[in-house]
Image: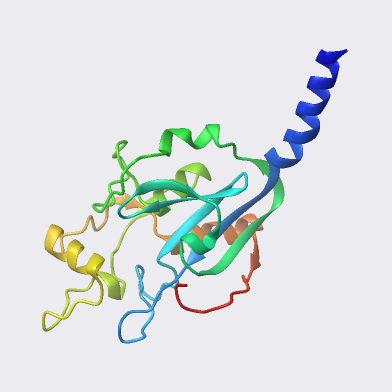
Amino acid sequence: MKTFIFIFAFFYFSIPLAWADIQVAFFSALDSNHQRVQFEENGRFNHVAIKVGKKWLHVHPYYGVQFVDSLDKIGVAEEILISSEKSFISERSVQKYKGLPYDPSFNWSDLKSTYCSKLVGEILVIQPKPMSFKGNFWQKPSDNVFDSMLQKYLYWRQNSSYPVGELGLSPDDIYEELIPRNYKTQIPTHTCRVFC
């Protein structure tokens, strides 16, 4: 009888949590001139995260792959796409990513590091495509003025030699792939429109 109760309780409490809508959050940012930071030419997003269970999984430039309890710990999400079908993404299935460092070289074939779009793309089985690096974020800074420490770091580390034409994904690529898959848009409500 105890075995029956245990099995019933296990399925009763775990299945509603395991089979759920897939949620993918997209983030944007403004530079010091209040212009949208674009990774892709005319792009909208500069970061992406995916909900796994009750937590959000993303890649932080300093901490690498990490789970956070709320989107507020990542930034202000501009949009969340929600699948129209129930699906299963378990914490166990993404454990292989936990603790991987951030990959500033955006190398799709590197198994020892990752970046946000690669992480989400691999989880959702989105095929990579040739990258262009034509957004304003990747342009050589003029007059030695840098809009952010990350841009300065990428410029000096790579001397503007990004893997143009190599396979990869951007947050905008993820977004454009999910819309035809019948993901629905949810605009988050915020208490503020800057990073809190």
Q: In the visual, does 173 lie left or right of 93?
A: left
Viewer-nearest residue: 142 or 60: 60
Place residue 39 in its image quadrant. Answer: bottom left
Q: Residue furthest bottom?
A: 33
Q: Residue furthest right?
A: 1
Residue sitting at x 25%, y 65%: 150
Position of residue 118 measured from the top left corner of the image (x, y, whole percent): 40, 49
Q: Is residue 105 above or below residue 13?
A: below
Position of the N terminus by quadrant: top right
Residue sitting at x 40%, y 74%: 29
Residue sitting at x 81%, y 32%: 12
Q: Is residue 124 above or below residue 130?
A: above
Position of residue 89 measured from the top left corner of the image (x, y, whole percent): 60, 40
Could you tell me if residue 163 is visible in this image?
yes
Residue sitting at x 28%, y 49%: 103
Q: Is residue 112 above or below residue 124?
A: above
Could you tell me if residue 176 is visible in this image?
no
Place residue 144 in its image quadrant. Answer: bottom left
Viewer-nearest residue: 84 or 102: 102
Looking at the picture, the colour scheme in use is rainbow
Viewer-nearest residue: 6 or 174: 6
Viewer-nearest residue: 43 or 94: 94
Position of residue 14 measured from the top left corner of the image (x, y, whole percent): 73, 34
Count of labels in the image: 0
Position of residue 195 measured from the top left corner of the image (x, y, whole percent): 44, 73
